[in-house]
Image (cartoon, rainbow, N blue to C red):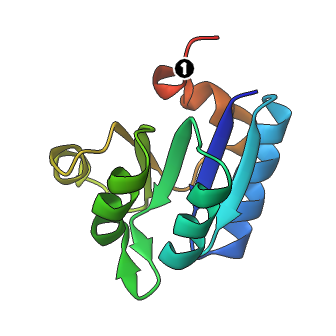
């Protein structure tokens, strides 16, 4: 089963994303900061990483190189910052999803970056 790691400091976003992915038949794990995210990578390698840009005191862009060192899964940024796509893509992100997102269509929105079954 396809597994997605969701990294966001907002508990409601983590819950909504996990519910949406579950509805789409995708498994997920969550992390609310960089340290937890790196611990999750030790437990299970994800097929995709959803990464919040404004991740509490740290930036998702700051965490991205550490994720890349440990995992080759595509990283899709979650952000409310419009017009920042080029910055994320230049840093090595596979894509960008805007907040707020519809949990019911999250699985479908991620299809371009998911491995082909």
Mark 1 Cα within 10 Å, few/some/many (few <14, many 20+)? Answer: few
Q: Is residue 96 left or right of residue 26?
A: left
Q: Quadrant of residue 39?
A: bottom right
Q: Quadrant of residue 4?
A: top right
Residue reaching furthest to the bottom: 57
Q: Is residue 100 left or right of residue 61?
A: right
Q: Nearer the viewer, residue 6 or 106?
A: 6
Locate residue 68, reporting x and y percent: 34, 51
Residue 3 to residue 99: above or below? above
Q: Quadrant of residue 10?
A: bottom right
Q: Which residue is mark 1?
A: 115
Q: Which image quarter is the C terminus in?
A: top right
Residue 61 to residue 74: above or below? below
Q: Residue at x 30, y 44 (%)?
A: 93
Q: Which image quarter is the N terminus in?
A: top right
Residue reaching furthest to the top: 117
Q: Is residue 80 left or right of residue 117?
A: left
Q: Nearer the viewer, residue 36 or 111?
A: 36
Residue 8 to residue 109: above or below? below
Q: Nearer the viewer, residue 64 or 43?
A: 43
Q: Residue at x 68, y 56 (%)?
A: 43
Locate residue 47, reporting x and y percent: 57, 35
Locate residue 16, reporting x and y percent: 75, 56
Counting labels gives 1
Locate residue 30, reporting x and y percent: 68, 61
Q: Secondary structure at mark 1?
A: loop
Q: Residue at x 41, y 45 (%)?
A: 75
Q: Residue at x 71, y 44 (%)?
A: 103
Residue 40 to residue 25: above or below? below
């Amino acid at each position: 089963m396809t597994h997605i790691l969701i990294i966001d400091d907002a508990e409601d976003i983590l819950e909504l994303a996990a519910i949406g992915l579950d509805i789409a038949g995708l498994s997920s794990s969550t992390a609310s900061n960089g340290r937890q995210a790196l611990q999750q990578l030790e437990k299970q390698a994800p097929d995709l990483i959803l990464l919040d840009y404004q991740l509490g005191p740290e930036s998702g862009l700051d965490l991205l190189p550490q994720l890349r060192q440990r995992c080759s899964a595509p990283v899709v940024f979650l952000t409310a910052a419009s017009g920042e796509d080029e910055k994320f893509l230049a840093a090595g992100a596979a894509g960008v999803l805007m907040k707020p997102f519809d949990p019911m269509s999250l699985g479908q929105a991620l299809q371009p970056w998911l491995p082909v079954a």
